[in-house]
Image (cartoon, grey):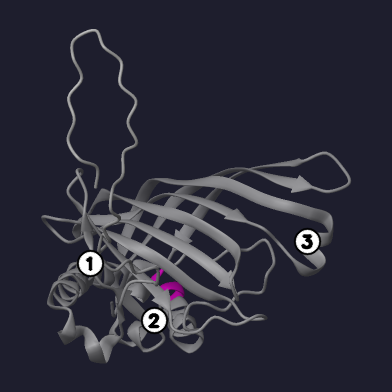
Amino acid sequence: SSAPFTVADGATSEQTLRAAFQAVVLEGISTGRPACYTGDRLAEAPAVQALWREAMKGVEHRRAFASQYAYRHNQRTRGTAHLRLIRDRRINSDTTIIVHPDSARARRARAVATGDTAQDKSLHIRVPSEMTLLRDDFLLGHCLEADPQLDSTGAWTLRFRALRSSRGTLSLDGALRLDARTYAVRQIEFQYLEGRREWASGTLDFAEVATPFGIVRLPRSARVRADPDGPMGLVMTRVEGDVEFHSHRAFEKVRGG
């Protein structure tokens, strides 16, 4: 290092300053993905396990309602298909949907058989159901990421991802946003991947609906986007849109439900 020196007021001095190098030790930086726990390893992450168990309890009310009641609601779809050779096509439809326990049972059976990830790569995009995600067998093919986050709106974000993702098949990654007070599902974020390529993604939001069964949290709206490949990819680059579910009515308890 250089020796000390002084400079008189108003004077000019030229000096050569020397300093010794000193190594600075930095903390290790991890660039990998966060730890992720399958069902048989949840005990290793108590916070993740507690959130998962509470969310499973919260969805039981919705599952009981779905097994006992038929009802109707309106579905409004607005979107755009971005085409390669001709003008983009607007998607506008308003439909009345009949929901019946028998159709719900069929969807659950199909989801269990396929892991709720099978897709035919058409414009039909299956939005994941909270009743399918919040099952013990879901964690046979998926894991829950460590360190769930609590945001300023009072919601926990619990992320999940598929254990395997390969070209030619679609896997499901995403997140559950849970109310911090009731642990009910506020929103599902989802992403379908083919290998590392995103094929489709979106969100599903929920709202409380008054029914003869009591207040039930049902889907309110969805936003979806897909980037088709294969034959569909030859004619379009992207399809995106919003779906609203409203006017829930004609609730009827089904015999045997």
Residue linked to disc 3: 233
Task: Estimate the x, y position of residue 240 in percent, counting from the top left.
Answer: 61, 48
Task: Estimate the x, y position of residue 102 in percent, counting from the top left.
Answer: 42, 76
Label 1 sits on a secondary structure element that is loop
Q: Residue at x 25, y 92 (%)?
A: 40
Is 200 placed above or below 38 here?
above
Mark 1 or mark 3: which comes first in sequence? 1
Distance between the alpha carbons at the discs numbered 2 and 3: 28 Å
Mark 2 or mark 3: which comes first in sequence? 2
Residue linked to disc 2: 142
Q: Residue at x 32, y 66 (%)?
A: 29
User: Furthest-right residue in view?
Assistant: 85
Q: Amino acid at mark 3?
A: Gly
Q: Residue at x 19, y 73 (%)?
A: 48
Is 111 placed above or below 97 here?
below
Quadrant in the rendering for residue 184: bottom left
Numbered mark located on residue 147 in the image: 1
Q: Amino acid at mark 1?
A: Asp
Distance between the alpha carbons at the discs numbered 1 and 3: 37 Å
- Between residues 64 and 224, which one lies in front from this camera angle? 224
Q: Residues within 10 Å of mark 3 (few under 14, many from 20)?
A: some
Q: Residues within 10 Å of mark 1 (few under 14, many from 20)?
A: some
- Quadrant containing the C terminus is bottom left
The residue stretch that appears in magenta = 100-104
Label 2 sits on a secondary structure element that is strand
Decide if residue 10 is on the left or right side of residue 174.
Answer: left
Quadrant in the rendering for residue 15: top left
Q: Residues within 10 Å of mark 2 (few under 14, many from 20)?
A: many
Decide if residue 115 is on the left or right side of residue 3.
Answer: right
